[in-house]
């Protein structure tokens, strides 16, 4: 049974900074076709005349622009606060070390504080320092980009090489999309793969989550875990089965869906045209507008628009 979260946590999750309906696209692990689904769903919304934003939150492997054959827009550096120490003012009280929940701060010698490890920029150490010995510095964590083609705008970000704090970069990316939300009728969010805290960061404020899976044992296992997560946050969701003809068990998949009271929206078998469109960097709904894959995504976008768009 899923854990029940406190109501204020659920409220925090649903407190959308967006002025526009957000559809999240999630997949338990890499390789289930999550980005292909997100790209084609966003392209279908745009083709239907909706001003559409696609936010590529897979910041460790951003490839929505590659799927769409679009050039990266001009980059803006995203920065995070981090402490700078003025040790001549330090009284050696060590309050900053005790306050840092990430254990980033070390005291290798008397009145010497060093920043080691991944600082989240929480500012707790700034607040407890009684001697004003800690000042606000900054470090770059990645690059934010915006690319527009017709009615589709892609917000993307790439983590700085070696940086680990992708949740902070995702937060910055979502803030950027939220600031422009009034320009769009719908926002599609492609989440990071897996079940890390970065998925929650990317899905915060989603009106509906489309969970992409496949009927293989690993796919069903990840589906179960992802739906358990969505249960905890009481998120509306449906399942998109990709590559429905892969070896596995549709019955097991449907049992998991039923256990989590989640409808199976639609699905696709292995589709050569979807693969060909990914290879050529054009959304399948544009490259093969009469194909089954195009009709599937067009129908999906129409259903979601009917439910969530004004
Ligand atoms: S800003 Fe937060 S995470 Fe960074 S060193 Fe200070 S207390 Fe630690
Ligand atoms: S809290 Fe301030 S004064 Fe105390 S050890 Fe840290 S830097 Fe020095």
Image (cartoon, grey):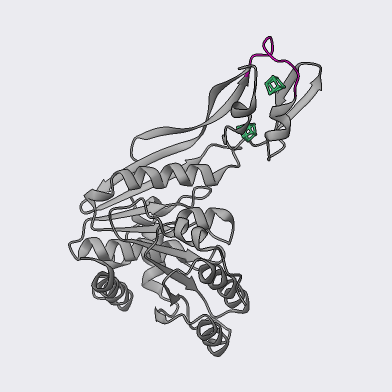
Residue at 50%, 58% (x, y): give it: 8
Place of residue 128 in the rendered image (x, y in percent of width and height, measured from the top left): 64, 28
Q: Is residue 79 left or right of residue 19?
A: right
Residue at 46%, 75% (x, y): give it: 242
Place of residue 122 in the rendered image (x, y in percent of width and height, measured from the top left): 57, 36
Residue at 28%, 56% (x, y): give it: 20
Give the quarter of the image for residue 86: top right
Q: Is residue 264 visible?
A: yes
Q: Which region shows up in magenta?
A: 85-93
Q: Nearer the viewer, residue 45 or 121?
A: 121
Residue lying farthest bottom? 251
Place of residue 82 in the rendered image (x, y in percent of width and height, measured from the top left): 57, 28
Residue lying farthest top? 88
Q: Is residue 167 above or below residue 218?
A: above
Specify whether residue 34 is painted magenta: no
Quadrant where the N terminus is found in the figure: bottom right
Place of residue 68 in the rendered image (x, y in percent of width and height, measured from the top left): 34, 55
Q: Is residue 198 above or below residue 26?
A: above
Q: Quadrant of ligand 2?
A: top right
Q: Is residue 84 left or right of residue 182?
A: right
Q: How many numbered marks appear?
A: 0
Q: Nearer the viewer, residue 180 or 301?
A: 180
Residue lying farthest left? 49
Give the quarter of the image for residue 77: top left
Quadrant where the C terminus is found in the figure: bottom left
Q: Is residue 286 visible?
A: no
Q: Is residue 88 above or below residue 25?
A: above
Q: Nearer the viewer, residue 174 or 56?
A: 174
Q: Is residue 229 above or below residue 190?
A: below
Task: Name the main secondary structure of what is drawn in magenta.
Answer: loop
Residue at 45%, 68% (x, y): give it: 235
């Amino acid at each position: 049974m899923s854990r029940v979260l406190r109501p204020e946590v659920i409220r925090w999750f649903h407190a959308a900074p967006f002025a526009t309906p957000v559809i999240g696209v999630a997949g338990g692990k890499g390789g289930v076709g999550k980005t292909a689904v997100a790209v084609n769903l966003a392209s279908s919304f745009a083709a239907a005349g909706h001003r559409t934003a696609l936010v590529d939150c897979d910041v460790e492997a951003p490839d929505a622009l590659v799927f769409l054959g679009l050039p990266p827009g001009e980059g803006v550096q995203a920065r995070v606060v981090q402490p700078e120490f003025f040790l001549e003012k330090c009284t050696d009280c060590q309050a900053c070390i005790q306050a840092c929940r990430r254990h980033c701060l070390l005291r290798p010698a008397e009145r010497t504080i060093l920043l080691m490890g991944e600082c989240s920029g929480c500012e707790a150490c700034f607040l407890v320092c009684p001697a004003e010995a800690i000042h606000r510095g900054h470090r770059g964590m990645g690059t934010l980009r915006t690319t527009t083609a017709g009615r589709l705008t892609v917000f993307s970000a790439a983590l700085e090489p070696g940086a680990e704090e992708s949740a902070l970069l995702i937060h910055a990316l979502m803030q950027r999309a939220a600031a422009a939300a009034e320009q769009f009728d719908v926002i599609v969010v492609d989440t990071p793969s897996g079940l890390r805290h970065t998925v929650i960061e990317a899905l915060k404020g989603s009106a509906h989550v489309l969970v992409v899976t496949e009927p293989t044992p690993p796919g069903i296992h990840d589906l179960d875990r992802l739906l358990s997560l969505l249960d905890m946050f009481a998120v509306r969701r449906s399942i998109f089965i990709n590559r429905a003809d892969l070896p596995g068990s549709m019955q097991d998949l449907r049992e998991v869906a039923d256990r989590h009271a989640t409808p199976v929206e639609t699905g696709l078998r292995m589709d050569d045209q979807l693969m060909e469109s990914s290879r050529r960097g054009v959304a399948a709904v544009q490259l093969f507008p009469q194909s089954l894959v195009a009709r599937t995504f067009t129908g999906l976008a129409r259903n979601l628009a009917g439910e969530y768009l004004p």
